[in-house]
Amino acid sequence: MPPDLKLVIHLQDLDNRIGELQREIGALPKHIAVIERTLEAHLRKLEADQAALAANQRDRKSQDTVIQVQNQKISHLKEQMMGAKTNDQYRAFQKEIEFCEKDIRKAEDRVLTLMEESEPLEANVKIAQVALQEEKRKVESEKQEARQRTSADQQALVALRADRESVVADVKPGVYSSYERLRAKRRGLAVAEAIDGRCSACHMALRLQFYQELRISTDDVMFCESCGRILFYNPPVSFEDAAAAQSDAG
């Protein structure tokens, strides 16, 4: 295999890994935004539950005020009734007192209803508070993990870029220029393997003579005649070679 071909194969592997890291680094802020929106949803739920409970309490306070005012009115009417001069005046005061008592009973019934309604509202607030605290803990944990992941990715990216610069320095300018042109044109896939007489990228069959030359070439970088990508050929590994490699690894 030509030396420059080995280098561009390694270069494409580096570029793929660099691209993956860049995408991951770019995706992490979006991930944080998503989990923060989830936290905001929990906060809005708590605020809604608190608002409902506050409205219940204001209504109860209003009804208590109605009861207090009507009781004061009844007390004042009874004092006036003691000084009534005629039966008609007495009955008029009595009727007003009955109206006040009716309003009191209505307010008391409303208070009882509000008290019953307040129990689940209070429970909802407590549940929402617990859920919000748990979500805050989860979000902070995920944000910390994302920050650590970003830092590690950025360090790995620096190392990969340094490795890439070293590889680029060893590649012939013409070969590197072709690689970059193809990478831009072919969505990052500039180098492809020839398998069973076909380009693995465009899947077009290679001419027999071209394929034979590719298999034995040790000097020239060759390009697919259909898609233009740089081609390489990996000879099959024999059982003996694979066994020897496994033995060496052991």
Image (cartoon, rainbow, N blue to C red):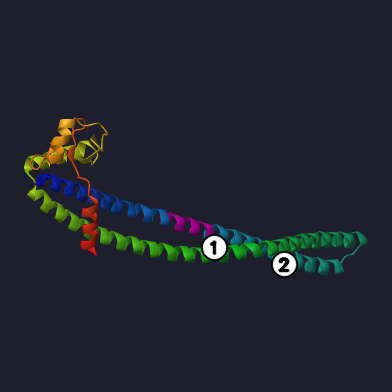
The foreground one among 2 and 53 is: 2
Q: Are marks 1 and 2 in contact (CB under 8 Å)?
A: no
**Residue extending farthest front:** 240
Q: Is residue 83 left or right of residue 228?
A: right
Depth order, front residue of 13/221: 221
The residue under the point 26% across, 61% down is 152
Quadrant of image for the C terminus:
bottom left
**Residue behind mark 1:** 128
Q: Which mark is residue 68?
A: 2
Which residue occupies 14% across, 47% down?
A: 6
* Location of residue 65 (image quadrant): bottom right
Left or right: 103, with 144 as reference point: right
Above or below, 237 against 151 in this view is above
Using the image, tell me which numbered label, if any, was put on residue 200.
none
Q: Position of residue 55 (x, y in %)?
A: 61, 59
Magenta stretch in the rendered image = 36-45
When the figure is inspected, residue 81 is found, relative to residue 19, above or below; the finding is: below
Q: Amino acid at mark 1?
A: Ala
Magenta region includes residue 14: no
152 in relation to 20, above or below = below
Q: Residue 163, percent across and down?
A: 15, 55
Q: Position of residue 16 (x, y in %)?
A: 24, 48
* Disc 2 crowd, CA 10 A, few/some/many (<14, 14-19, 20+): few
Q: Which residue is more in the foreground, 221 or 130?
A: 221
